[in-house]
Every structure is written in C-alpha cells, then in structure tokens.
Amino acid sequence: MKTQSRQGLRRFQLEVLYYGNSYYTERIAQLETALSRKPRTLQIDMAGAGEISADAALRIRAVLMARWPRTRVITNSRSSLQNGSALVWLLGDRRIIRDDATLYFRRANLSEIKAAESDEVWKDDEPKFCDSDSEVDPEEGDYARVLQLIDEFLPVKELAGRLIGMPVLRQFGLVDNEKVDHFLATCFRQKREPAKSPLNAPEEKRIRGKVSRPRQARR
C-alpha cells in the first residue's frame, strides 16, 4: 500500500518474504508506476524475516536506476536483512534501519558456473552427462551480480558471512548521513563567515570614531 504524507513523501511498502516470487512481480510493477509519477521523495518501508531473491533484487534495482533523477529514495528497514534484501536497502539515497538490526550476505557458490565468452570457439560436441547434484543454478549467477553491487557499498570479501551491525554501517557512512551533512554544512558556513576577533575591535572603534567626530567651526 502506498500513502502520501503532507510533506510530499510517498511511502511504498515492501514485505521481505520467503518464496514471494508472485508478490515481488506485482510489487515491482507497482513500484515502477509509483516512480513514473516523479515524486519528490519515495520511502520504501521494508519488514519481514524472509529474503528478496537475487533476481527480484536486480529487477528492483533496474526500476530504481530508471527513475526521474530528482526523485530521492529512502530505504527504511524495520528488520534485519540478508543477501538480495541487503542490496535493495543499500540502493537508497538515504538509509534507515532499526538500531539492533543487522545486514548479512553469504558468499556466492560459483564452483560449477562458467560464463560464456564471446571469443570462445564453439563446438558441436554433446555435453557430458551430469547428475542432478552438479547442475548449475542460474540464480547463483544472479546472486554473484548482487554481491558485485553490494561491493560498491561494503567490502564483500572481508564482510561476507558476518553479521554487520550499526557501528560498521556508520563507519562506512551508510546511515546517519543527514547528521554528517549538517555537521559539514555548519563547518563550511563558519569558514565563510568567520567570527569577529578581539583584535579587530580597536580598529573598528577607531573607524567609528573618525566617522562620528564633529567638524570644528572655521574661525
């Protein structure tokens, strides 16, 4: 359900579910419709103990990347997030998460996956038989792409397989951005408008004295 506040903030509810393929197909279409209206700010509220699949996360990213450039996206999570869900949260221009919630993403299992290269020599040989235990899951290839995108925000190599709490998110500047921006803006404003020092006071008094000194009458 989407709601709009008095300040022009549109809210978009996104449940984090297990096995919610049909749900995400519908919600992604609705998200695209909401963004097509060019809102000033869209807040995506996330909650649930499930996981957004890699494919759904990549489709949500495609919709967000195609939005009107002036639309600001806020991602707000009331739950801990994992894997594809973590990527969706990271895509916000501003990110909010429950204080005791965590992010988690596992490593990709790419041992059985080989990407097709454009310069590869194609052969007509039939592939060797492989049992069901060695079949390649295309979803794992999508998840590898998810990790590449997460790596733009957090170092995947060092943090994969670990619970990432609020202190680490703050360390990487992923939360509390508005407080940091306000602090920097205050510092820059003070540099542009330096306070008057006591050393300038006598000079200012002398100037005022010259201006206010009455002229002597001519004899």
Image (cartoon, rainbow, N blue to C red):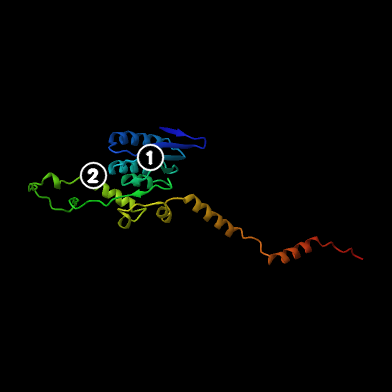
Circles 1 and 2: CB atoms closer than 8 Å: no
Q: Indicate whether 171 appears above or below 199.
A: above
Q: Which residue is mark 1?
A: 47
Q: Which mark is residue 2?
A: none
Which amino acid, by three-letter code, is at mark 2?
Glu
Question: As drawn, which residue projects farthest toward the front?
Answer: 100
Q: Mark 1 or mark 2: which comes first in sequence?
A: 1
Q: Residue furthest right?
A: 219
Q: Quadrant of residue 56?
A: top left
- Residue 10 location in percent, x, y? 45, 36
Viewer can see residue 100: yes
Q: Residue drawn at (21%, 45%), measured in percent from left and top? A: 138
Residue 57 image offset from top left, x and y in percent = 32, 43
Where is the N terminus found, in terms of image quarters?
A: top left
In the image, what residue type sits under mark 1? Ala
Position of residue 163 measured from the top left corner of the image (x, y, whole percent): 34, 52
Task: State the image coordinates of residue 41 (x, y, percent, origin top left).
Answer: 46, 40
Say what secondary structure mark 2 lies in. Answer: helix
Read off the residue under disc 2.
139
Residue drawn at x 13%, y 53% as measured from the top left: 121
